[in-house]
Amino acid sequence: MLSLKSHSKLKIMKKFLLLSLLSIVSLTLNAQIADGSVAPNFTATDINGNSHDLQAYLNQGKTVILNISATWCGPCWNYKQTGALEDIYYAYGEHGSDEVVVLYVEGDPSTGIDQLNGIGSGTVGDWVSSTPFPIIDDASIANAYQISYFPTVYRICPDGFVYEMGQLSNTGINANINANCSGNLQGVSNHVRAEVDDVKLCEDGLSADLTFSVKNYGNNPLTSFDYDITSGSNTGSYSGSGNAGLFGELSVTQNVTLAQGTANSVDFTSVNNSAVFQSVTNSSGFEVALAGQVNQQAVEVHVYTDNYPSEISWDIEDESGNVVASGGPYQPGTDDQWGGGGPDAQTTKVHSVTLPDVDACYTVNLYDSFGDGWGLASTIDPGIEIFENGNSVFLRNVGDFGSELNLASAMKYNETFSVNSFDDYNFSMYPNPSNGIVNFTANENFSVELYDINGRKVLQKNIDISEELNLSGLTAGVYLVKVDINGISRTEKLILK
């Protein structure tokens, strides 16, 4: 009998089987390179344009870990989610003691940079933004190492011999290298890194709890640390304590005043009452953004489903945790034993919602009963979007978030604003979609704030009614434009081509 975990792997693989059938067949025809063979040398360029020469790394006395994977591979994604290779990279890679090189190799010739970024079909998620070590898109490396399946993880010691290491934990990789390569990994002391989630606020400049984790990448136990939190123009100094060994984590919650701006970070100033190891991991940035502003009670919730709609549900909570709206699960299909396909799969489910007639800040919660998020889709970007008067005020596309994703401060209802009074100003914005030049009409001058789909403010400007706005320097995509005229505001969606 298959375990739930095995079911999950099979389910993910099934979706992409036809896309990658030729690749799988070609792999099974190869004989895996024998343990103890001389590692085939390669020189390859990663997706950021940096060159990597295997023999050069070995000549420097470094151990090289090759993680040969494919973007559509569920077990590859599951191993990535463990964070084991990221931990080895931070502790012993270029941002640690610089004794180990970790390389991700995309081994399927039919996939490319779009799939690595989680775009389109043939991918289970965004591999790039959450992978700190180099990514090489070069199937010839997979062919040279004659892999039989994804993922295949190799260890190459400085002596140049290759061995399959398997999907080990962070401590397992550490022990494997120490047992098989000449000399033990030395590491560094007083080396930590913070993982800080982005924050949304219903109002700018609010006091809120900033929660983050501190992970120990140093040889000695982590018992105390001092750090600064900077948000906007404010910086505060704080201290923390606990007990965490190598790869251990401590959770920190600190109440601070948070403000929008680019200067938002957690910076360590000392560890264990000693100088902190200086590397790019010493400072961790985070974004502060505003919730979508809603000026009337009637909104529309659009749910973009993946291929397993019967696992999908959602709700909206007020500040007291009361559910004011909910939806799902949706109709299952018959494509497989998990209810794949059907009329509700990879489509848009629209719900009319009436919010309570009181100023409130709302949290949007997404649920998946199977526990693998809403990431299994090829013709749609799964997620949720909220509209007011046809204008998008909140959008979040998602992938594999597990069983539950809580999106705090997603939307704020402002009872005191009247959308009808805004219409008195005869405001319009055109063309939309735009190639970068945006024009406006209105009875009076106004201000605009421009946000990307993650809620980050990218522009704030006062506009003269005869002025055009040049946004050609921004990346193409969907943006939210908050317009304020005499204290009355409305948010509209803008598409840049």
Image: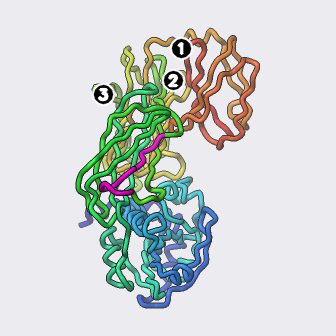
Residue where numbered disc 1 is placed: 419
Q: Which mark is residue 388?
A: 2
Q: CA distance from mark 3 to mark 2?
A: 19 Å
Q: Is residue 13 visible?
A: no
Residue 162 is left or right of residue 242, and the answer is right
Q: Earlier in the sequence, mark 2 or mark 1?
A: 2
Residue where numbered disc 3 is placed: 323
Q: Amino acid at mark 1?
A: Val
268 part of magenta stretch: yes
Q: Identify the element where label 2 is drawn.
A: strand
Q: Residue at x 39, y 37 (%)?
A: 236
Residue 377: % across, % down: 48, 51
Q: Amino acid at mark 3?
A: Val
Tag 3–tag 2 contact (CB < 8 Å): no
Magenta-tinted stretch:
264-275
Q: Nearer the viewer, residue 109 or 113?
A: 113
Q: Residue at x 33, y 44 (%)?
A: 404
Q: Nearer the viewer, residue 288 or 333?
A: 288
Q: CA distance from mark 2 to mark 1?
A: 10 Å
Query: Is 328 situated above or below 341?
Result: above
The colour scheme used to paint the residues is rainbow
